[in-house]
Amino acid sequence: MADAKVIPFGEEPRSRRAARLAGAAGTGGGAAKDAAAKRAQARGKSSSSGAGPSSGSGSGTGPHSLSSVPDQPDGVEDGMDAASASASASDDDAKKTDPSSQPGESKADAADAPLPDGEPQSGGSGWDRRLAEGFAFLRRRVTGDYEVDEFGYDKELTDQVLMSLIRPLYENYFRVEVKGIENIPTDGGALVVSNHSGTLPLDGLMMQVAVHDNHPAGRHLRLLAADLVFMLPVVNELARKAGHTLACAEDAERLLQRGEIVGVMPEGFKGLGKPFGERYKLQRFGRGGFVSTALRHGVPIVPCSIVGAEEIYPMLGNSKTLARLLGFPYFPITPTFPWLGPLGALPLPTKWTIQFGEPIPTDGYPPEAAEDPMLMFNLTDQVREQIQHTLYKLLVQRRSVFF
């Protein structure tokens, strides 16, 4: 009997194993299936050749036949290798797409990471900062660790408290629109001259907020107020803290020497308490004392026109008897006051516009020009005409008193 090479059970030829491993590594499960199909085809041919006539017995031990060698179920190994490769590839894809599976980073770390642009992770940090600033402000108030200038102006109190109280009236109630704020110089002194109206001097406060909140250099307006303001309880202290001072040449000159923005309303009570029928008609500007002050210090004069204040308290009459008894320059009678009592003191929600005009320079005049009455009259009339002309222009552009 011819010698036959017997392949031990469970062992496959090295060439077939190498081809199978190379196919599995290169093509994955598809190559494994092709290799399994080829082996099945080879086994079919082998079985058909072994089923032919032979001189030996049916046990396959004849001289011309080889005993059938049972093959290792390679399909099982190939399938397992393909499934393992597929599962490994799926795991790799999942790791690439899932940021929490990246090395050195977990979901907890991603949740704790700061938000972009420096935003806090929660709203608590902003409130914590505000509370800390509020407590620090109260501590300075209690200990007296704050500064007040020679006029009683408290900048910190004005910025953090007084302006915050007035700003809702400015932004939401009167909806003030500001124009020409760039005409106020960024440094040095200047004199802002404005019309005056509205029965109560709310226009001065609105002008002060307009400069404080809109000027690019963050400048403050120091208003010159009438003597009556500093005779009233509570109002006196608040006016001093807000930077107001007496409407006199001495105080105005001291402020201008320090490079402050000074606001003056030359109409005084004549403009503030004029009848509703004379609204937006400027009254006399006095004797031109503000022009003389500007000439002495060579600061520009900035005309300012305010539209909307005339209608907040339509003044239909004036009770002179009550005014004399109370020591007021006038006692207004409006459609709601005094008929509705304290409710009648609520101003109407008119739409305001504040426009700062082009400055009128005064630094080109000689020092003795401040004593020239004709020059003061001409400059006073120029400022008044510019304010009046701007008022008429704004009234034409206005769509409605309230909108």
Image: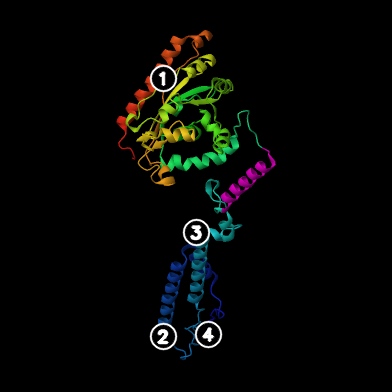
Residue that carries the numbered disc 2 in the rendered image: 51
* CB-based contact (under 8 Å), mark 1 and mark 2: no
SS for dot 3? helix
Residue 179 visible from this viewpoint? no
Q: Helix, strand or loop at disc 1?
A: helix
Residue at the spot 55% in from the left edge and 25% down from the top edge: 260
Which numbered marker is on residue 1?
Answer: 4
Q: Which of 36 and 235 is in front in this view?
A: 235
Q: Where is residue 80 in the image (x, y as percent from the top left)?
A: 51, 73
Residue 195, placed above or below residue 8 = above
Q: Which of marks 4 and 3 is in front?
A: 3
Q: Nearer the viewer, residue 376 or 336?
A: 336
Magenta segment boundaries in residue numbering: 124-145
Considering the numbered disc 4 on the image, is that residue within a helix, a strand or a loop?
loop
Observer-side mark, 3 or 2, equals 3
**CA–CA distance between discs 3 and 2?**
56 Å
The picture places residue 386, in percent across and down from the top left corner, at 38, 21
- Residue 128: within the magenta? yes
Q: Earlier in the sequence, mark 4 or mark 3?
A: 4
- What is the spatial separation of the Cα atoms under label 1 and label 3, in whole angstroms? 71 Å
Q: Estimate how packed mark 3 is, as few (under 14), some (14 to 19) or many (20 or more) residues with alpha carbons within 10 Å.
A: few
The label nearer to you, 2 versus 4, is 2
